[in-house]
Image: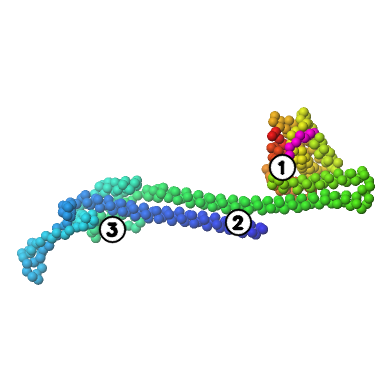
Amino acid sequence: MKKRLKFLLFIAVMTVGGILLFQCYWVYNTYKTGEQNLNKLLTAILQRSIDNYNVQQIKLPATLNGKSPHLDVLEWKSSSPGKTSRPGEKGTILKFNEVSVNADDIARVKLMLVQLISEGEGKPVRLDLLRQLFTEELRKSNLQLSFKLLLLQHQQRLPKNKIAGYVNFSKNSSILEADTNDTITLLLAQNVLPAVISLTLILLSGGSLCYMWIIIRRQMKLDTIKNDFINNITHELRTPLSILKSTHEVLINFGEVEDHEKTIRYLKTNKVILENVDRILDITQFESGLKLVKTETVNINELIVEIANRFRLNNDVEIVFINDSNLAQVITDGYIIDTVVTNLIDNAIKYAGKQATININIAALGNGWQLIVGDNGCGIAPKYLPFIFDKFYRVPSGDLHDVKGYGLGLSYVRLLVESLNGQITVKSKVNEGTVFTIKFQNR
């Protein structure tokens, strides 16, 4: 069992570790993907700002803005066949050709003309205007970033993993770079939801596995307690059944049946033994609801005295019963009260030792009555008190089996008390004793 438990623990730890590593990788990968996408977006915005800047700086042909956009292309050729000529030379023929431009391509044509013309003019780049245009484009994209524009004039390749773009088409074109430190903050803000979801999944997965581990440990503990309970109840039943068998053999085989007094004593002993066995068998019926509460008017004084006398006959125990109130008749189930008090006294005798003193008190309450059963036994340690009403639970006593009894269990007592609309509590101190208080409310 321990090897299987260790194996389950190993599987649980590996599962939690795998989930944790996967979620961390997923969050990191999401962050890096977001970083790449943001850089691409900012680079596109910067290039758009550069294009807008160039458009504002250069005057374009008016023919591109008409109803039939076109470009006038100047063509020249020599009047003498086979001879090459240049514009302005004699014998050169000049001719304007009209080249139509598709309406969908006007923006690209304008941009190409702007970049070619700006390179030819050699005007200095105005960073202040570019900064203004870049800020406006960021605002249109709902981005708020602090940045600094750098003009790289002696660099031909765009810097890697940077937000940069060429100012024009020329081979020696300047490079404009946008330097910002706010992208990390923006990325964190964009990835906070996936990170929270990932963390929640990690916590839920880990919590579920931990809860599963706790349930397994609890079930194993309950299984151990159940086996101890079965072993104990088997041990306890062996004694009364042996007594029952012995009394019957004496009556049948040795002629004791003719002794009327002895026969009556044996039969009463057998009757008590069978009643205790019945109480053990009644546990299942009460738990399943097959055995119902039967209320009647009960003389509580007579019932407690009868129970006490049963224990005084066979045990060296002092039972003190006190009823300071005028309460004598109560409406309850006499069988259940008998079972509860019998079990509490039996437990007190088991744990109080040879010099057991048990005090039973009856008191009236405003809307019911109260039963108190206390002893001067060894008491119960505080760490065990929360569990004494759990099913099959017994206070640990090592490997010793020196505690006798019928093994009914305090969980059964609580079940019976609650069936009568009652509430049971316990107070105990080690080496001083234990006190059970039961309060019943009138139905």
Q: How is the image coloured?
A: rainbow
Q: Which three-letter amino acid code belongs to the residue tagged 2? A: Leu
355 and 243: which is toward the camera: 243
User: Residue 375: x, y in percent?
Assistant: 77, 38
Q: Which residues are magenta?
A: 293-301
Determine which residue is flagged by label 1. Answer: 292
Observer able to see residue 432: no
Question: Is residue 106 or residue 214 the one in the foreground?
Answer: 106
Residue 337 point in image, percent of width and height: 76, 39
Q: From mark 1 to mark 2, how far is it between C-alphas?
A: 45 Å
Q: Name the secondary structure under disc 3.
A: loop
Mark in front: 2 vs 3: 2
Q: CA distance from mark 3 to mark 1?
A: 95 Å
| Callout 1 touching callout 2 (CB < 8 Å) | no
> Which mark is nearer the camera, 3 or 1?
1
Q: Secondary structure at mark 2?
A: helix
Q: Residue at x 18, y 55 (%)?
A: 69
Q: Quadrant of residue 305?
A: top right
Disc sitting over residue 9 in the figure? 2
> Callout 1, which amino acid?
Leu
For the point 6% across and 69% down, which residue is it? 80
x%, y% of residue 296?
75, 36
Q: Which residue position is annotated with label 3? A: 155
In the image, is residue 91 above or below residue 327? below
On residue 229, which mark appears?
none
Question: Which comes before the other along the chain, label 1 or label 2?
Answer: 2
Residue in view at x 21 percent, y 49 percent:
56
